[in-house]
Image (tube, rainbow, N blue to C red):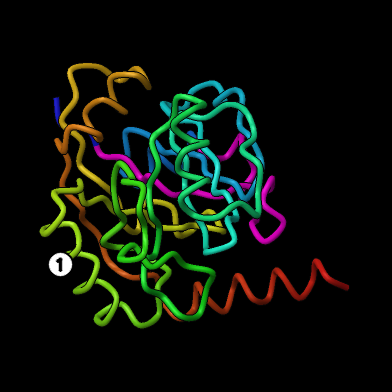
Amino acid sequence: MRLKFDLHVHTVNSRDAFTDLDELSSFCRVRGLNGVAITDHNHACPEVPGGTIGIPGIEVSSRDGHIVGLGLTSLVRRSLSADETIREIHRHGGLAVIPHPYERLRPSVNPDLLTVRPDAIEVFNASTILRSLTRKRAIGFATETGLPPIAGSDSHIPQTIGTAYTLVDSYSTEPASLLEAIKNGHVQPMGESIWLSQRLRKLLLQARRSR
């Protein structure tokens, strides 16, 4: 079956995000998603909220940039090198994904410098500002290395969930089956960039929180 998944979603467990866990199910329905991957910054998601088909994960802060671990329910130590972080994600049984590669405005890994192979690369991130530059390089790297290309919204507010997503061909909605399909490249990245008004909304919410 072909499933529509946003593989990069943040909740209030990320200090810069504003989506409650119990909102995920309703926003998935509105967006026509089958589910999401919850990838909060350095915060484990041991249990996906009821009513949501989901993949637990973490966005780990390595010394060289962010790395997403899909399928993780326990923490991976931050501030390791990118190669060490990938090894740790694998040791915990997860898939290592390079999100928003080559981007200069966020802590991003340059995959050309890796000596340990990740499991997938995010070729489309809806929150990336200079998308035309980074997407071309990311697609080129995925093509050259044979890494599965995926997409995610990198959503930090409910309104952007599902802006970018990945079509996953999986025989089941169980996380293990979804992860196997992603690792084996049964994926198709899709979506569009978030709107300027949505970027401003996030900034406004961050300003209010910091008061």
On the rendered structure, is 109 left or right of 10? Answer: left
At 18% across and 17% down in the image, what residue appears?
A: 171
Relative to 102, residue 71 above or below? above
Q: In which quarter of the image is the N terminus?
A: top left
At 53% across and 64% down in the image, what residue appears?
A: 64
The image quadrant of residue 22 is top right
Q: Where is residue 118 in the image (x, y as percent from the top left)?
A: 33, 45
On the rendered structure, is 210 left or right of 63? Answer: right
Q: Position of residue 30 (x, y in %)?
A: 38, 44
Relative to 159, residue 205 above or below? below
* Magenta stretch in the rendered image: 4-24
Question: What amino acid is found at the position of numbered circle 1 in the picture?
Answer: Gly
Viewer-proximal residue among 175 and 2: 175
Mark 1 sits on what residue? 140
Q: Position of residue 135 (x, y in %)?
A: 24, 71
Relative to 45, residue 135 above or below? below
